[in-house]
Amino acid sequence: MALSRKTSKTKRRSPSYEAIGQFYDSLWTENPRAWTTARSQMLEPILSHVRQVCELGCGTGISAIEFARRGLKVFALDYSREMCRVTREKALAEDLDVQVGRADMRSFRIPGQVDLVTSEWGVINHLQRRADLVQTFRAVARALRPGGYFYFDLHQRKLYEGGWTQTLMGDGVIAGAGTEFFAAQHGGYDRTSGKGWTEITIFARRPGGLWERRRERVEEIHWPHGEIVRDLRRAGFQLLRVSDFTDINSAPSPKKVHEGLRTMYLARKKGR
């Protein structure tokens, strides 16, 4: 993984979703039941001890809204202005206590410290260098109270090779707006660099019948489990639990497997 080991300081590229943020919920409508079940099994035992949570890379605010409905104080952060806009509109529509802000996961700061930081659906895969990974884990540790929890997931090589290399097409309508759209997606994966990418093209019908084209390129890095464990430890975390999926429908393994599809992690910041 030569790419992930570079430590030179470079300006972070926009992680995209500016062009397709408003279509995101319509494009990806359902999560596999096995994944949502495993997520609940990892989070439910600790949520009774949580009063404040930070959702890092909140996307369209699905998890942030879920936490706020439980009565939790929520900080929802994302680098994409469009994702922040969508999340803010959802929170306002339900009058929920969600503070939405644009932030870089490597250097974000929030007022005080929270009990839980979450980062879901491969947000951390967007990091391009190992130095970025270390910085992010340290920023998460700074945002957590001693004994606080860090839940996140990672896409694995099998997902990129099996899913991102396919050509997918579909159509739909944006809920609430009534905007019709057609989408096409295709990408690839380079084992040498550990980089996966996907190109998403959307044609959206505008008033008057004209179609507008939008295009987005998303790049992610496959992070080896050993590097994740090592850098969590360096940032002051104790790894509590792992759930590793080899396919979409099966129950997860409680241990890291060689050819996983997606991995969920639960870690805890060490106390003073």
Image (tube, helix red, strand yellow):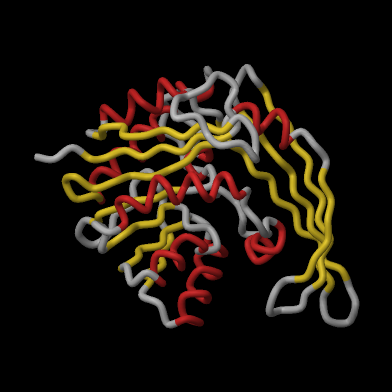
- As drawn, the residue found furthest toward the left would be 272
User: x, y percentage for residue 122?
Assistant: 53, 42
Total of numbered circles in the picture? 0
User: x, y percentage for residue 105?
Assistant: 40, 47
- As drawn, the residue found furthest toward the right would be 209
Residue in the image at 78% along x and 74% along y = 179
Q: Is 211 left or right of 244, judged from the image as shown?
A: right
Residue in the image at 65% along x and 27% along y = 158
The quarter of the picture where the C terminus appears is top left
Residue in the image at 53% along x and 18% along y = 1
Q: Is 183 left or right of 49, judged from the image as shown?
A: right
> Is residue 59 placed above or below 68 in the rendered structure?
above
Residue in the image at 45% along x and 65% along y = 66
User: x, y percentage for residue 243?
Assistant: 46, 34
Q: Is 144 left or right of 91, judged from the image as shown?
A: left
User: x, y percentage for residue 104?
Assistant: 41, 50
> Is residue 244 placed above or below 269 in the rendered structure?
above
> Is residue 214 placed above or below 210 in the rendered structure?
above
Quarter of the image where one finds residue 99? bottom left
> Is residue 224 placed above or below 138 in the rendered structure?
above
Quarter of the image where one finds residue 138? top left
